[in-house]
Image (cartoon, grey):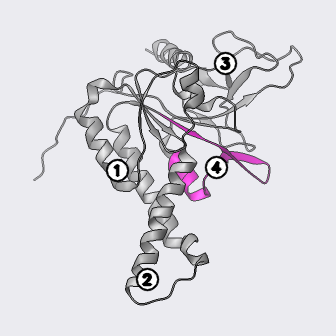
Amino acid sequence: MKKLDHPPAPLTLTRERLRAVIYGEYGRGKTTLALTAPRPLVIDTNGGLISVTLQGGTATTFEPEGYEDLEALYWWVKEHSDDYDTIVIDTLDSLVYALMDELTDDTVESKQASGRRVGLRMRFIPEQADYYASQRQMHRFLVALRQLGKHIIITSSLRDFGGRTAPNVSPGMERVVCDWASLIGELIILDDVDGTEAADASGEKPSAGGRVLLTKESNARATKSRFRTLVPYVVEPTFDKLWTLVQKEYGGNK
């Protein structure tokens, strides 16, 4: 009979960490927000860190070439666990594209090895099985990251389908990632305010031209929050502000 590797443990903030998906239009500051987290290791699939670098931000980065690199990175982080508090994926959509390309290439190579001709167009069109395989890859990787006990922040550009905004991935991949996350927020810039907007849980009110992280569940967006103190939005969000509000809620529930 298999024995437990570790016993069941109480649910506490010392064991639980923030698992956030931050999506939005380009130039909203998603990467900048992600890198306000403590001691980040960035899985960089987008090459979009230059603005953060110019602002004086620092981080350790890794550019994976395929799924096997992600598996190897997991074991590397496990060995260097004391060096990092946060894992950032920047961005989700570009990582999914890279994984899908790898799967599609593998499918094409298998067909060609069996003597089948593959047209130029078909070399770039994933099959249905590739989508499912990509979702399974992502699910396995995210669960493994969660078990490392680090904060995890994932950025993504925005997809608008029928008036509903969401991370820029397929509906199936959206379900995988959003089921895993404890916070999904759309980062926006307010064009205008009329002065009647309520303050967030920290007491800060939105201002014109300011950034707001929308978190309230809505039919108009794929947002959610398992933390009441982050609903309905967070004004000028940083990691410290988000985590302080989460800790405030936890302390109030003791």
Tell me the residue at 37%/25% (across/down).
85
Q: Position of residue 155 (x, y in %)?
A: 56, 38
Q: Nearer the observer, disc 1 or disc 4?
A: 1
Q: Where residue 231 appears, x then y in whole percent?
A: 65, 25
Question: Which quadrant: the C terminus?
Answer: top left
Q: Earlier in the sequence, mark 4 or mark 2?
A: 2
Q: CA distance from mark 3 to mark 4?
A: 23 Å
Q: Which residue shows up at 63% across the image and 11% down it? A: 202
Task: Using the image, tell me which numbered label, if any, was put on residue 236.
Answer: 3
User: Residue 168's mark?
Assistant: 4
- Residue nearer the viewer, 74 or 178: 74
Q: What residue do we see at 70% from left, 38% from top?
A: 26
Q: Which residues are magenta?
A: 153-178
- The reply to whether dot 3 and dot 1 touch (C-beta < 8 Å) is no
How crowded pointer 3 is (Cα within 10 Å; few <14, some 14-19, many 20+) is rated as: some
Q: Amino acid at mark 4?
A: Asn
Q: Which residue is mark 2?
A: 111
Q: Disc 3 or 1, which lies upstream in sequence?
A: 1
Q: Secondary structure at mark 3?
A: loop
Q: Are marks 3 and 4 in contact (CB under 8 Å)?
A: no
Q: Position of residue 225 (x, y in %)?
A: 58, 32
Tell me, yes or no, if residue 227 can be seen here: no
Q: Is residue 56 magenta?
A: no
Say which element carries label 4.
loop
Residue shown at 44%/52% (left/top)?
A: 138
Question: In 3D space, how far apart are the residues under numbered discs 3 and 1 (Cα atoms)?
Answer: 34 Å
Question: Few, some or many C-alpha atoms within 10 Å of disc 2 (few <14, some 14-19, many ≥20)?
Answer: few
Front of the two marks 3 and 2? 2
Residue ID for mark 1: 69
Instruction: Name which residue type carries label 2.
Output: Lys
